[in-house]
Image: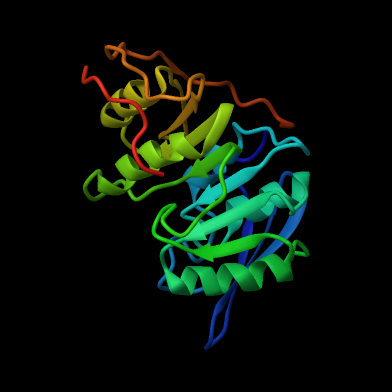
Amino acid sequence: MEMFCSLKQCTLYSEVNIVLKTVVRGIELTFETANDLFSPRSIDCGTLALLSTIEFDELDKVCDLGCGYGAIGIIAAKIMGSENVLMIDNNSLAVEVARKNVVLNGVPNIEVVLSNGFSNIQEKDFSKIITHPPYHVDFAVPKAFIEKGFNRLKINGAFYMVTKRKTWYEKKLTAIFGNVEISMIDGYYIFKAIKRHENYAKVNHKKAKVKTPSRKKGGGAKYASRNGD
């Protein structure tokens, strides 16, 4: 799947905003962004690497957790339809811009919600939760995303995450989900964990094997049962 950091992207500037034009999976996309948002001049390499590992189905129910200006959620909606896509961010500017972008890209039925994680969200039973969390600070945000995200997935739902770090995320996902699959693409670790039980896993950490996929064109702690939302 040809979706890595060599992707050509065109950025236009104005005094008010930044307009990013790009093509992902053969889909032409236009995003309004802003300097105060993450990666405003191009869809970042980590997000592209993450998206290259995910296959969307029309029956999916998807949450873009920490959506920024909306790239992941909008791409998902363009593939599977917008009615079952929810985008969340705790940044009011990100939410404002993402709401403009869902209209701009012809998927106005996407719900975009201002929320600190899932605190303002009632929805659950997602088949996919997808996130690119901040990983250059402490682990408080990804910890909450993993724990609360587990609770919002349906059985056999998948939690996807991309970071530049491996060890802590591997241990945490294994402790909560009891499993994790790791791929390395363009220097990023892509994590996929499946919810197989209603409660947090009670397992000892085992080292997961890192897979480095070929680029073909075309394509220890014990946790108690679930707590909170």
Nearer the observer, 43 or 194: 194
How far from the left and from the top, in percent, is residue 135?
31, 46
Tell me if 75 is positioned left or right of 166 in this view.
Answer: right
Give the position of the C terminus as an image quadrant: top left
Seen in the image, is 74 located left or right of residue 181?
Answer: right
The answer to whether residue 50 is left or right of residue 180 is: right
Number of numbered discs on residues: 0
The x and y percentages for residue 77 are 72, 51
Q: Is residue 199 above or below residue 59?
A: above
Image coords of residue 150 (percent x, y) = 45, 34
- Residue 170: quarter of image: top left
Q: Is residue 69 visible from the viewing direction of this image?
A: no
Of 98 and 22, the residue lying toward us: 98
Q: Position of residue 172 (x, y in %)?
A: 31, 28
Q: Does residue 92 show up?
A: yes
Compared to 158, does 45 lie above or below? below
Report the front residue among 27 and 180.
180
**Relative to residue 147, is residue 94 depicted above or below?**
below
Identified at 73% across, 44% down, the residue is 25
Q: Residue at x 74, y 53 (%)?
A: 83
Residue at image point 64% right, 61% down? 111
Residue 104, quarter of the rendered image = bottom right
User: Could you tell me which quadrant the N terminus lies in?
Assistant: top right
Q: Which residue is located at x 59 percent, y 38 percent?
A: 125
Residue 174, quarter of picture: top left
